[in-house]
Amino acid sequence: QKEVEQDPGPLSVPEGAIVSLNCTYSNSAFQYFMWYRQYSRKGPELLMYTYSSGNKEDGRFTAQVDKSSKYISLFIRDSQPSDSATYLCAMSPMNSGYSTLTFGKGTMLLVSP
Amino acid sequence: DTGVSQDPRHKITKRGQNVTFRCDPISEHNRLYWYRQTLGQGPEFLTYFQNEAQLEKSRLLSDRFSAERPKGSFSTLEIQRTEQGDSAMYLCASSKTSGSYEQFFGPGTRLTVL
């Protein structure tokens, strides 16, 4: 079993839909959680990060962490065709000084106009 | 542009050749990371530096791979005697060591070994 599991998709939605992207993890040492967006043949771009359980909102994006269930989510409201990309969750244990990120495989999102 | 830069962006080489990649981090970041990403997978951690010290190396980093950051600024990643399995995107990232730890990634170097 991989430390971080993420459904690779693709996930296809119409423009304006609410998108839910999820990751589960097995390592209870993970304390720092991030979501990256990666367009084809580009480097990952940081979207959101959080250290605690609960919700964190930034514009159309909401990150949710449930440490008791070892489950994290990213919600995208009013999705746009420009949101079409691969979304990667990443996490790190505190004892590494947050240095070693473990990524999920990424979920490919396709938003159709 | 004040982001992470990598050079070259693409490299095609023949099996058995040596290749070297360069990464220039964001100037005020003293941590620098190398990751490898293959098609359909997330990035996998290879190694990281804090200033010029290499603090951690993944078991993925075979002895054909070596990374340096001699003056605590740019870094190089060298792969000796390349194999077809080395074909991947090599990503560099940088971060601070206090306050916020977010890692900012460069555009990557895509390596193809023929």
Image: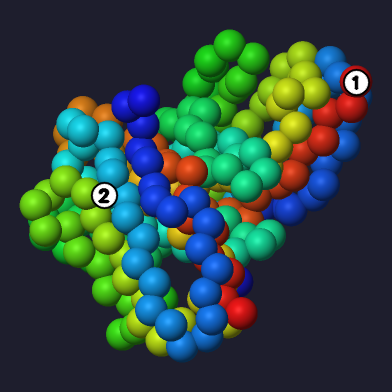
Query: A45 or A62: which is nearer to us?
Result: A45
Give, as a three-letter code, the residue at label 2: Leu
Q: Position of residue A45 (x, y in %)?
A: 51, 35
Instruction: Identify which residue is drawn at 25% across, 67% down.
Output: B67
Quarter of the figure with residue B22 = bottom left
Instruction: Judge whether A37 appears above or below A91 on screen.
Output: above
Visible in this render: residue A106? yes
Give the CA separation, mark 2 to mark 1: 39 Å
Find disc 1 in the rendering and name its residue: A113
**SS class, disc 1:** loop
Instruction: Identify which residue is drawn at 53% across, 57% down.
Output: B10
Q: Tell me if label 2 and label 1 are in contact, CB under 8 Å.
A: no
Quarter of the figure with residue B104 = top left
Instruction: Identify which residue is drawn at 55% across, 68% down.
Output: B12
Q: Which mark is residue B32?
A: 2
Q: Is residue B94 shown left or right of residue B108?
A: left
How many callouts does the rendering have? 2
**SS class, disc 2:** strand
Q: Which chain is indicated by disc 2? A: B
Crowding at label 2, few (<14), some or many (≥20) Cα neighbours within 10 Å?
A: many
Query: A15 or B63: which is nearer to us?
Result: B63
Give, as a three-letter code, the residue at label 1: Pro
Quarter of the figure with residue A87 = top right
